[in-house]
């Protein structure tokens, strides 16, 4: 994986948390901890977007998608 170097400033409490998390979870670097945290944040954003999108489904789609079977009727 290609990595781009980035310099950030964080409060000392956050750096202490990153270091503590790194050692307690046997993670090789602080960068990997930050990457993991950002991956989780991205997953949360995607989950939220999927939830929102699922609420936008047209009820007529469910009827059309059921091949004319109502209320999960069996053949």
Image (cartoon, grey):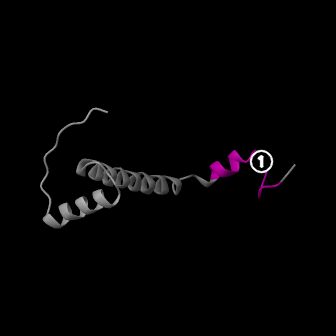
Name the residue: 84% across, 52% down.
74
Name the residue: 27% across, 32% down.
2
Name the residue: 14% across, 63% down.
11
- Dot 1 corresponds to which residue? 68
Instruction: Name the side, left or right, on which 37 lies relative to 44.
Output: left
Instruction: Name the side, left or right, on which 59 lies relative to 23.
Output: right
Where 74 sits versus 24, above or below? above
Q: Is 63 contained in the magenta span?
A: yes
Residue at the limit of the structure toward the top, as seen here = 2
Residue at the limit of the structure toward the bottom, as seen here = 13
Name the residue: 77% across, 55% down.
70
Image quarter where the N terminus lies is: top left
Q: Is 6 contained in the magenta span?
A: no
Quadrant location of residue 59? bottom right
The foreground one among 35 and 60 is: 35
Q: Which residues are magenta?
A: 60-73
The foreground one among 61 and 72 is: 72
């Amino acid at each position: 994986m290609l990595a781009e170097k980035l310099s950030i400033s964080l409060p000392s409490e956050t750096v202490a948390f990153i270091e503590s998390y790194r050692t307690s979870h046997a993670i090789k670097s602080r960068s990997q901890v930050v990457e993991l945290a950002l991956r989780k944040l991205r997953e949360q954003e995607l989950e939220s977007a999927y939830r929102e999108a699922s609420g936008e489904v047209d009820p007529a789609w469910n009827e059309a998608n059921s091949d004319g079977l109502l209320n999960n009727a069996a053949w």
